[in-house]
Amino acid sequence: MSPLAFRVLGPLQVHGPDGPLRLPPGRQEVILAALLLETNRVVSTNHLVDLIWEDNPPETARTQVQICVSRLRKLLAGADGEVSITTRPPGYVLHTDPGNVDAALFTDLVLRARRLRDSGEPDRAVGLLRDAVTLWQGDCLSGLDSGPLANKARQLNEERLTAVELRIQLELELGRYDALVGELQRLTHEHPLREKLRGQLIQALYWSGRQAEALEAFRTARRFLAEELGLEPSRELRELESAILTGRLPAPAAAPVRVPAEKKAEEPPARTSAAATDEEADTAAPTGAPPAESVRQDAVPHQLPAAVADFVSDAGQVAALEQALTGRPGRTTVGLAAITGKPGTGKSTLAVHVAHLLSETGFPDGQLYCDLRGTTGTPATPEEVLGRFLRALGIPGQLIPESLDERAEMYRTRLASRRVLVVLDDAAAEGQVLPLLPGSRGCAVLVTGRARLTALPGAHRVELDVLAEDRALELLARIVGRERVAGEAVAAEALVRTVGRLPLALRIVAARLAARPHWTLASMVQRLANERHRLDELTHGEMTMRASLSLTYEGLAPEDRRLLRLLSMAQAPTLPSWLAGALLDDHRPFPSDLMEPLVDVQMLDVAGVERTGGFRYRFHEIIRVYAREQLAAHHTPEVRQEALARMAGGWMHLAQQAHRKLYGGDFTVLHGDAPRWEPPDAYTDEVLADPLAWLDAEQASLCGMVEHTADAGLHDLSWDLATSLVTLFEVRGHYDLWERTHLSALAAVRKAGNLRGTAAVRASLGSLYMSRNQFDTAKQALNSALDVFQALDEPMGEALCRRDMALIARTGGDDLAALELYRRSLADFDRAGDVVGRAIVLTQSAHIRMRQGEIAQAQGQLDEALDIYEGVGYTGGRARTLRRVGQLLLEQGRSDLAVLTFTEVLELCRDSGDVIGEGHLLRDLGHAFTVMGRPDRARDFFDRAVTAREGVMDFSGGALARLDLARLLDAEPGRSRELLVPAVEVFRERRMGRELAEAERLLATGC
């Protein structure tokens, strides 16, 4: 470890061999802090400029940053420490041992502690967590004046508190209650809003024999939250209070030991050609674009929706479901249960409630959830659901097979040694469910649906009906208030009987009463009695539900009724708040204010919270059907079309802005002329802070809008949105969604005679077919699109077509044809003013130059591409080009620099969770160390490449790495044969002739 010690967990400090070093305050402090927070990673000059000057940098800002860095180098060099700051485009890197920086050491200690906890060593984990927290000397970077850095500091401060909470939880599990009370009293005083700390204090007091103090701690929390925030304590705290009052608070139990990672799959996904060639790298996902979640072999999904706090359960039903799902000793089949019943009986609520009860103890390896949309016009297909589940289980989209059978095989393989609970909500029929059943007895499946689902083999069935009277009264009391119900007991019983004890109907009526405390329960009974004829039908299905919904609907303000009707056009699973503004053409800064009146009467449910802090909403399907009926009755087709255009224009605006943030502008994409509807700027900036994550999260809504606009004749919006979503489809490997949305848009533009839109969709489909290695079909689509673009004199379209046609020629080995197509594509991109398109062509064609020995020309093209990517801020393109730079350096014999470059790109892959790119770079590093004559290092990287590729079932990439490794092991024939036999199988199946020939030759020579 270096004699220097850097501290950011508190005031910024630098310690040398002779004591603290004096760091000039101001800009040098900010720059050093930024570099330390990203130790051994590139920090761009632009980022440093923003940290110092934020919105108004001077023209000399970059020069001043260079001067500050130069002075920091002198300061650190004078200390004679093993630390340096090097220039690395587009900025600088501070190189030092990570253990020399307290923040990095803190992160490492917490990570190691979590691993010890998961492996069943909580005592050792506690020790590491204590060591981690003792590194702190105050708030992170306290005293440093930089707003952007303060955000990073707040994140680290939050991680510190999380580590403290984790350590206390482990000590509670170890029974150290008395020793924790004093510390927890101090912590809850310092952090009064941390409800987890308050819960831990309540548990420590109770299990120390101080029950009265534990209850007083809960009441103190309730008073504080009510006075300061107007909120009730969380469900967890309320459950603690109830458990103490009933004497049923269980002692904290240690978390179960995790099940080892499952075995490798026996069968690879279907592919038609090599998945790890250099050509594939140019069509793969942009390495620098971070996904919604990292794709890892140990991915543990937690997809359950939130449980309903006021749920009134039937203990017998819950116990029977738990038994059916967790099973008896000796069970040899998957646990299976089905909850069925009429609409509004609480099927989904019961399923989620039971799933949460079992999530940690019964199924620690994760919970998968999907709304099968069985009551909608477009139920989810088994292929679609399996694709979602495989991604959640760690399989990159590019590796998911096309066919249902192969997806089901991969799904069962992934779950073979795991304990996972699968919740399938709103199933239409057994055929929708059967392909989604795991094969492992350690897993379980809980299904809900209106149909009885009697053909599910061995399923335990629960058929829900209306509530028993006592449970209906309990539900009413929880919503309206116990005192109010007790004060009108007879009226309460009459009200429950009048609504037929149907949970949804009762919730709707109770919500109106809760919103109007001046109304009596008797007056509500009288109001319902006035519509006796409809309410008599309340227990007879959907028609009776309409009566109850109508009662609530008529109580809304006219503008709220209008919004409810227009919202019913949205086909998204959940609704962002900005949709209300778009539908009403209302540009207020907080559009959720438009939604809340509908939430108050439970015509809308709150489905979750966005990254902006705003809420997402959803309809109960029956309410949506009712609202659509009202829509048809109150609005002309012209009004509906205008509202739909505004809603689609909002999605289009956000999708276009996401693309701009990823690519640095409207590059490499065509747009139509349909008007956009712009949500508030602040909302757009916040929700698109991570644009790819937003695209991923809104995938269902965006794809649904493509099809909705196509069906409605809004062809310009349909094709524009479809082609804008290719960014998402490429990165995630959503080839099925790519095709489905584009075929819908293509039908719409053809029907409308929209030539430009038709060509744009055809060109995009050409890229899709190329990604699937369907090169003949791709050529047909691209040639068709190119003819139209030429007739329209559309340079961007011509550029995109010729670029993809060049890549097809290059893949087929026709370098001369590829270079000519690249030359013309480059001219087209220049005519269109698209610099990113130019950079992509330069990078792709540079690989041909390298193969032809034109090193200087290749170097010039890669340098120009890097300059472009740095200028626009397109990280994915920069990463792809840097990989080519590393390969070029290796060709030039500059192996050390090649290793440094490959290592940098490998870090980018890991940061973004790009395991495919990681496999590429591990192979590149193996090749580099082979050239350097360091076979031990090369062998290590090739081994890791095999593990990385095969760990996500990319068997083509794994076979290539096996071949690389076998070449190194000519002195170990047994190990070489072990590597080559499965590789030969893959090469033969994927028709990789050149690789197959070499592998068979090595086997024949006894390598």
Image: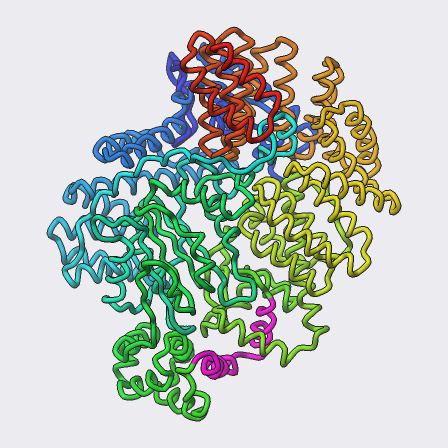
Judge whether 3 appears above or below 200 on screen: above
Residue visible at 39% across and 14% down in the picture = 3
Judge whether 10 appears above or below 897 on screen: below
What's the magenta bit mostly, secondary-structure-wise? helix
Direction front: furthest residue: 1004
Front in this rendered view, residue 590 or 41: 41
Residue visible at 35% across and 89% down in the picture = 522
Front in this rendered view, residue 824 or 126: 824
Residue 553 belongs to the span the image colors magenta = yes
Judge whether 423 appears above or below 774 on screen: below
Q: Could you tell me if residue 227 is visible in this image?
A: no
Q: In the rendering, at what x and y percent does residue 676 appear? A: 71, 57
Residue 114 belongs to the span the image colors magenta = no
- Which quadrant is the N terminus positioned in? top left
Q: In the rendering, at what x and y percent does residue 755 appear? A: 82, 53
Q: In the rendering, at what x and y percent does residue 790 appear? A: 87, 42
Q: In the rendering, at what x and y percent does residue 258 appear? A: 30, 39
Front in this rendered view, residue 653 or 805: 805
Which region of the structure is painted magenta? 541-569
